Amino acid sequence: MANIRCVNIRKSYGGHTVIENLNLDIADQEFVVFLGPSGCGKSTMLRMIAGLEEITDGSVNIGDRDVTHLHPGERGVAMVFQSYALYPHMTVEDNIAFGLRRQKVAEEEIARRVRHVAGLLGLESLLARKPKNLSGGQQQRVAMARAMIKTPKLFLFDEPLSNLDAKLREKLRIEIRKMHLELKTTTIFVTHDQLEAMTIADRIVLMRAGEIEQQGTPAEIFDRPATRFVADFIGSPAMNFRTCLVDREGDRIELQAGSIRLQLPSGEFGELANGMKVEVGLRPSKMELATPHDKNAITGTIVLVENMGSEGQVIVDVDGQEISFVTKGFRTLEPGQPVSFSIDPASIHVFSPETGRSLRKAN
Ligand SMILES: Nc1ncnc2c1ncn2[C@@H]1O[C@H](COP(=O)(O)OP(=O)(O)O)[C@@H](O)[C@H]1O
Ligand SMILES: [Mg+2]
């Protein structure tokens, strides 16, 4: 187990810089997720930490060792990729044991460790099978077992669940988390799937174009997005955005757009001045059907009701633009009906149209 420190990391391919100057600390035993859209540099960062990709500038420490110029095999890391890449002619047992056999570990010790990781991952009954006789989820579990058996200081996962169907992804996600509770190995897990990141991470490092846009616990990222980009990237259904005008008189702040009027708690929005244009973000899951006394009610016409099981997403036309919200009380709602819904002022997000930064005071 080990902490990780990345200092002033730069990565160029030829003359093209994909990571400019990235600094990141990961604590011992932490489970960190690199999240971001395709091409933002997640795999590149992971591969530089693993030693599979040369670091153009800067340094990486694993534990108290500077590993910047060390061979991957000397770094004490194990990596699991999206594709399983098992040896097709070997049994599950031999696939898992392969790395240890190459290191000439005693057979008795190998057998003991194979049993242990097979138990952790529910592979006991599959040890004699060949990979072609396993499902995708089972193959990925074997790939994980093969990485784990080396008892690495650091686990690196690069989109390990992307090739699996939704149900299996959910199941393996929980197993990876349980494994971490037991082994406590420091882990970096790469995904472009925000839900996967939210559910699996201790801390999310959200990347954009080779830079860290925001890092924090899933709750911090979800409830207090630092930028419009983060707000838009996290959460499903996605956040609604409207350009609003600020109407401010002393401590009274109101956001206005067409028929929409939203009262804001002034203490948290010191920077908002009368006449300013701002981007306002409203999370579907933070809105609810309005009661008659709601101050922040928005009224429109229902366009569509999407049944999500225990809740429904209601898409509403408000002044010719759609806003969606999520409610358990969706079953009586029909397209064409008028509807009023409201949002808790504490859940209103306000962003600068110029910088994209949140205009809420940091707290
Ligand atoms: N071997 C390479 N040569 C040139 N450019 C590369 C290479 N590998 C990755 N890139 C570029 O680096 C950027 C980051 O890629 P990557 O780390 O794979 O993104 P992610 O994993 O977040 O999808 C992308 O613009 C990609 O095109
Ligand atoms: Mg990638």
Image (cartoon, rainbow, N blue to C red):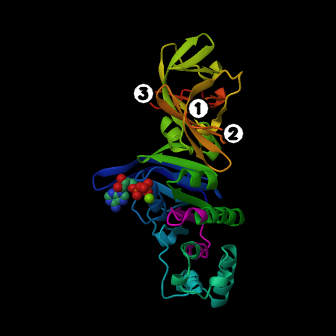
On the image, which quarter does residue 337 sit in? top right
> Which one is nearer the viewer's eye here, 18 or 321?
321
Residue corresponding to mark 1: 337
Q: Which one is in front in this view, the residue at disc 2 or the one at disc 3?
A: 2
Image coordinates for residue 322, horizontal then vertical, percent: 50, 33
Label 1, label 3: how far apart the Cα atoms are: 37 Å
The residue indicated by pointer 3 is: 354
Q: Secondary structure at mark 1?
A: loop
The span shown in magenta is 143-167
Q: What residue is rendered at 69% in x and 84% in y?
A: 112
Q: Pointer 2: what residue?
A: 329
Counting residues from the start of the chain, the first of labels 1 and 3 encountered is 1
Choose the circle earlier in sequence order: 1 or 2.
2
Label 1, residues with CA under 10 Å away: few <14, some 14-19, many ≥20: few
Image quadrant containing the N terminus: bottom right
In space, the residues marked 1 and 2 are separated at their CA atoms by 14 Å
Given the image, on which type of amino acid does mark 1 rest?
Gln
The answer to the question of whether label 2 and label 3 lie on touching residues, with beta carbons closer than 8 A, is no
Task: Work out whether 18 lies above or below 230.
Answer: below
Check the image and name the residue furthest to the top: 249
139 up-or-down from 24: above or below: below
Query: Ligand 2 quadrant?
Result: bottom left
The reply to whether the residue tagged 2 has its Cβ within 8 angstroms of ligand 1 is no
Q: Measuring 63% from the left and 13% from the top, which residue is drawn there?
A: 251
